[in-house]
Amino acid sequence: MKDRIYTSFEEVDKDLKLLNLRRQIAQEEIKGDLIDIKSHFEPPELLSFLRDGVLKKLLFSWLIGFIIRKIRK
């Protein structure tokens, strides 16, 4: 926040409450992000990532290599 000159304790309390609410919102956002991250590391999610990403790339590269070797012979 900007530097501010307070003229009453009510203004200070108001800003403290606002900062506390912002902190609580940030904590809840972090909790939600952690839940999302944890869900990405669960076994079904990891298996689908491997199946869809890594295994397809490996199979495709093996297939291309196999075709190239057959053409060169």
Image (tube, rainbow, N blue to C red):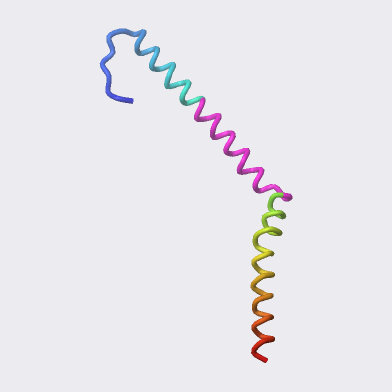
Q: Residue at x 65, y 62 (%)?
A: 54
Which contiguous range is marked in magenta? 25-44
Question: In the rendered view of the protein, which quadrant contains the C terminus?
Answer: bottom right
In x, y percent, where is residue 72? 64, 89
Examine the image and state in which quarter residue 60 appears: bottom right
Q: Is residue 60 above or below residue 50?
A: below
Residue 42, magenta (yes or no): yes
Q: Is residue 47 above or below residue 17?
A: below
67 left or right of 33 in image: right
Q: Residue at x 64, y 43 (%)?
A: 38
Q: Residue furthest front?
A: 71
Front-most of 35 and 50? Answer: 50
Q: Residue at x 50, y 30 (%)?
A: 26
Label total for image? 0
Q: Is residue 71 above or below residue 58?
A: below
Residue 36, magenta (yes or no): yes
Magenta stretch: dominant secondary structure: helix
Q: Residue at x 68, y 81 (%)?
A: 67
Question: In the rendered view of the protein, which quadrant contains the N terminus?
Answer: top left
26 left or right of 12 in image: right
Front-most of 59 and 36? Answer: 59
Q: Residue furthest right?
A: 44
In x, y percent, where is residue 27? 52, 30
In x, y percent, where is residue 37? 61, 43
Examine the image and state in which quarter residue 66 appears: bottom right
In x, y percent, where is residue 59? 69, 70
Q: Residue furthest bottom?
A: 73
Q: Is residue 47 above or below residue 3?
A: below
